[in-house]
Amino acid sequence: MYAIEIQNLMKSFSSDVLAIDHLNLTIPEDRIYALLGPNGAGKTTTLSILTTLLLPTSGAAQVMGFDVVRQAAQVRENIGVTFQEIVLDPDLTGREVLDIHGRLYKMPTRQRQERIIEMVKLVELDEAIDRLVKTYSGGMKRRLELVRGLMTHPKVLFLDEPTQGLDPHNRAKIWDYIHELRRQTGLTIMLTTHYMEEAEALADGVGIIDHGKLVADSTPQALVTQLGADVVHIVGHGSPQPFLQALQQLPYIQEIHQSDDEGIHLQVGVDNGNRRLPEIIHLASRNGSQNGSQDEFMIDEISVARPSLGDVFLKLTGRALRDR
Ligand SMILES: Nc1ncnc2c1ncn2[C@@H]1O[C@H](COP(=O)(O)OP(=O)(O)OP(=O)(O)O)[C@@H](O)[C@H]1O
Ligand SMILES: [Mg+2]
């Protein structure tokens, strides 16, 4: 059984903009699936439809087998949600936030109290749980929101940008908690992110979304290994054509992608980056200075890295996936 199924989903907010464009997706139970994409790609819109907060323009979706339009109440009984923007009453304590949420879902008192203890332990809020939310740091608020979504033992947890605005340390903490949740059987997590590291760190499945379209749907490993064992990143200026042509002749070059924002960025998939680097640099200098003209290609920066989902994104969309 699939935890989430989406068939030909469309959402438009006005006649000319499709926020979601023919989206098809299936996510099996017990998985962590990350929807990765830049600002405005349609991530929140997709989650809003799946969590019954927004109606689709056409197409359909089911969560745990329940239709998000016709069986919205059953869908809500099965899900937990953490929103992109923090929505917490600053004048409540953390415990009150969790308790009120439990009451809303008609959890008996005893169950609520027990669940709060488990949740506080999971995200290490400790004695801070009895402090007012307005005294919390950004990271603590995110942790509280994460467990609020979990209070009611959902089968599917939706996290919209769970680490937005957090520093790397706090981001890694949230990742730890999500990994911990993963060990609880039967919980499916669908999260959105525009941090490729987040998708790589957490997800079994990744969908890359751009302009409302799903441009890739696979495992993080499968997506990155298409690009070659290593990727050589080159930033330069001038005319790269002679250099690119020379590169293409080399037998060990797997893929070449180019994007032209803020200088020329080349992404070259190779079998072994460190070994090939000297020859690539040599080739650039030969093909740069050869004609001696103004538009010769000059390398400003060059580096070797394992391929990342950011490289995959560049390949699929021709644009770099940048953090805000
Ligand atoms: N209520 C709305 N009314 C009109 N347009 C909207 C509305 N909500 C979203 N949009 C538009 O739909 C598109 C997708 O927005 P969405 O919020 O789903 O993107 P996102 O991938 O979540 O972006 P971000 O990374 O910034 O959170 C954007 O073009 C956005 O401007
Ligand atoms: Mg969003």
Image (cartoon, rainbow, N blue to C red):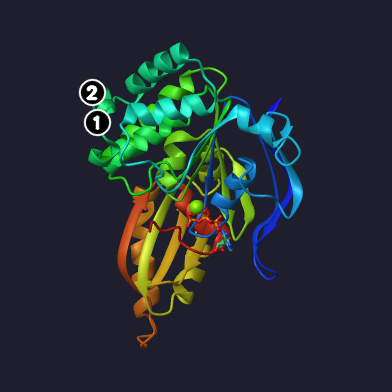
Residue 80: where, in percent of width, then height?
A: 53, 32
Q: Is residue 296 left or right of residue 12?
A: left
In this rendering, is residue 127 above or below 268?
above
Q: In this view, does 5 lie to the left or right of 78?
A: right
- Residue 178 visible at all: no
Q: Which mark is residue 254?
A: none
Q: In which quarter of the image is ligand 1?
A: bottom right
Label 2 within 8 A of ligand 2 by Cβ: no
Nearer the observer, 72 or 287: 72
Q: In which quarter of the image is the C terminus?
A: bottom left
Which residue is label 2 attached to? 127
Residue drawn at 57 percent across, 20 percent down: 186
Please, what is the three-letter code of the amino acid marked with disc 1? Answer: Arg
Nearer the observer, 280 or 176: 176
Q: Is residue 2 left or right of residue 115?
A: right
Which residue is label 1 attached to? 131
Q: Residue furthest bottom?
A: 293
Label 1 within 8 A of ligand 2 by Cβ: no
Q: Is residue 3 left or right of residue 158?
A: right
Question: Which quadrant of the figure has residue 50?
Answer: top right
Could you tell me how far apart the alpha carbons at marks 1 and 2 are, in whole angstroms? 8 Å
Q: Quadrant of the N terminus?
A: top right
Residue drawn at 48 percent across, 48 percent down: 309
Secondary structure state at the residue bearing disc 1: loop
Nearer the observer, 22 or 310: 22
Q: Are marks 1 and 2 in contact (CB under 8 Å)?
A: yes
Question: Which quadrant of the figure has residue 57?
Answer: bottom right
Residue 214: where, in percent of width, then height?
A: 63, 51
Q: Which marked residue is nearer to the observer: mark 1 or mark 2? A: 1
Residue 123: where, in percent of width, then height?
A: 34, 26
In this rendering, is residue 323 above or below 175?
below
